[in-house]
Every structure is written in structure tokens, then in C-alpha cells.
Image: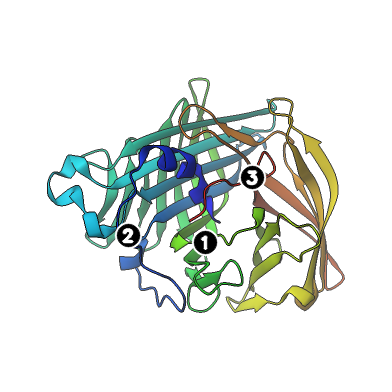
Amino acid sequence: MMRYFIAVLWCLICTPLWAGSYPVIDGPCHLVFPDDHQSHDLHRTEWWYVTANLHDPSGNRYGVQLTIFRRRLHPVSDDIASVSAWRTPQLYIVHAAVTDVEHNRHDHAEDMVRAGPGLAGSTREGDDVVISMKRNRIRFTISGLVVHAETGGIAFTLDLAAKKPIILHGDKGYSQKGPARDSASCYSSYTRLMASGHVMRDGKIISVSGTAWMDHEYSSKILDKGIAGWDWFSLQLSTGDEIMLFVMRPDDVSTLPFVSATWVAATGEIRLIPREAMSLDIAETWTSPETGTIYPSQWFFTLQPLQLSVEISPILANQEMVTAERTGVIYYEGAVDVVGTAKGALIQGVGYVEMTGYAGGLDGRM
């Protein structure tokens, strides 16, 4: 989902006010791959996001996250990159995390660098596209992805084989995030990837396998004024279906939130689900011992087209991301379990949830 806010405060402080404007997204994106796996450097914000629910040979559970963000610091009208490659307007940020259920740990790390020779960027290598930042990289291949994270003590490598083709959310990739037409992103996902690889834990290499999800979004303006934050879910069900759901929470609690969901059926059929066909209710909350932030920690979700009724719960309560060293933003990004029924049959599943704005308002707007 919309992870651009990570760099907003830093950019507001450190970036001069340049003339010009960013490209607008207000209609179908018509994405073409592999070209559109690459960066879209004229747009203000972009992110490539991989999460996975994994287990080792002993059955111990892990969740992993790697997100690479790109932030353009000023519009193209004053493009200083032509003067020197070292004066690029592109800023790259990485967030990485490993949730270890057996040891009740959620370790996370961050880093930031301007794009430059050998530092960060998007490259084309034959049919592959590589998004990299220092030692972190996401390689898009014909069959899926290869992901490597190595930053701040977090390290893992995964081979991800696509079980379904990449999908486009909304109207041909145009994913609207509010009433304004240009409050939107171009949004694509691999909703079911089979994962195998290893994670490093305290100097030990641990073999893991499971399922993964990949998002790629870019935009120049997403949030309308009056948005307190958002809740985003990616769910992979034992039926073979996947669901992406996001809720844009308004500051005014009397106002209905902006909600959108995509259902990817086991057959590969893609359907945009209307608000009236689903419900999401908070059942429990959790208070962070580090920041005092109160987050939802259990949900009841229903989806009429699937006759779906499930409970969603984090695999570990504390999966809070406190990025104080570089980007200074607090949010929640964690692996979840899904249990319930669909068409009267018992089902289960796994996924990820992201929650922003609970630790304070989003002061930066795109």
C-alpha cells in the first residue's frame, strides 16, 4: 500500500521548494511488463514491497518484509541530475524486518541514500529488472522474483516463483485512494508467490519456505486532506483465493472511510469488490510497550461474494516498525493468520497487515 509517508518529514525539512509539477495519475495506467517493473522517475513516490509468511523444517514461523522506496525530491523542471550523477533528485529508502514467533522477536532495520552509481536505482538486465539499494535488491524474472535483504542486522534471501500472473488493481492499474480523481496510484501485485530460501538469525543460516506477496505502486499524489491514516491487508486463503483490502481512515470519525478491495479467485479471475459487499470490524487492540501507540490487533472480516467470514490475527503482537534512526516514522507492519469459513467450509490463510497514523497524524501530504 501507500508507504510514501516514510520520507515525507525528512523531505519537507531538507528539500527546497522547486518550481514545476509532478505527473498526474487520474485514469487507467495500462502497465506493460517487464518495463513497468522499473522505476517511474518523474513521479514523486514509488515503492516495491515484498512480504512472506515462512516456516523452517521444524515448523517454526517467520514473517519477513523488504520494502524499497523511491522519493523524487523535486519536479523535473529543475532536474539537476544532468549536471552530475551524484546530484540526482532521487532518494532511496529501505525498510526490512523479520518476525520470529518461536523467540517472540520482531527485528527491523532501515537505511537511506540518494541514488547514485552503485548505490541505488532501477536497472534492466536482459529480461530481468533489478531494483536495488546498497545490499538490498528485488530482481524481477520471467518466472517470479529473487529477493535479498541485508541491512542493519536483517538478512534473508528468497526465490519467489509466481503461481498466478501479476494483477492490476482498480481500473487497469489505476487505484483510487479517495474522492479526488488524482488521489490515486498505479498499483500492481503478485498475489501468490511460492517462497524458498533462508533467513539469518544470530549468525545462523535457517532454511525456510512458504508463500509471499509483492506490491509495486507509484504516484505523485495519493492522500486527500483529512486522512488520519490507513489499514491495508493482503490475505492468501487456503481456497486458493487472495484478497487485497485497504481502508483510508478520515480524521472525522463521523465520515465514512474510503474503502477498496480486490478479490483474486483461485481460477485467476479478478474482481473489484464494492463497499456494501464486505465488512471489517475491530475485535481487539494492542498497546505498544515502546511507543504507547494503540493498534487494532484482531479483526472480523466478511466478504459476500465468497460467503467468507474470517478472523484475522497477528502471528506476534509486537510487529511495530519504529524507524527513528533515519526516517522517524512509527507504523505497524506484521504477518497475520486467517481462520474462518467460506461457503460453509472451514478455511485458513496467512497474510500481512499495515497500519499507519495511529502514532500521530500524517503531517506530510503528497
Residue at image x 59%, y 79%? 269
Mark 1 or 2, closer to the camera: 1
Measured as percent of width and height from the top left, residue 204 is found at 50, 23
Query: Where residue 164 appears, x then y in whole percent?
Result: 52, 68
Q: Look at label 1 and name its amino acid.
A: Ile
Task: Give the labeled residue for mark 1.
Answer: 222
3D distance between C-alphas at marks 1 and 2: 20 Å
* Amino acid identity at mark 2: Gln
**Residue occupying the point 48% across, 39% down:** 95
Quick one: label 1 or label 2, which is nearer the N terminus?
Answer: 2
With 236 as the anchor, is 1 left or right in this view?
Answer: left
The answer to which quarter of the image holds residue 84 is top left
Q: Earlier in the sequence, mark 1 or mark 3?
A: 1
Q: Position of residue 30 (x, y in %)?
A: 40, 78
Image side of residue 59 versus residue 154, left or right: right
Give the Cα distance between marks 3 and 2.
Answer: 31 Å
Describe the element under mark 1 as helix, strand or loop: loop
Judge the density around disc 3: few (<14), some (14-19), many (≥20) Cα neighbours within 10 Å.
Answer: few
* 24 or 244, nearer to the observer: 24
Circle 3: residue type: Gly
Which residue carries the number 2 mark? 38
Q: How many marks?
A: 3
Dot 1 crowding, Cα within 10 Å, few <14, some 14–19, many 20+? many
Q: Are marks 3 and 2 in contact (CB under 8 Å)?
A: no
Viewed as shown, does residue 228 lie left or right of 149? right
Which residue is labeled 3 in the image? 361
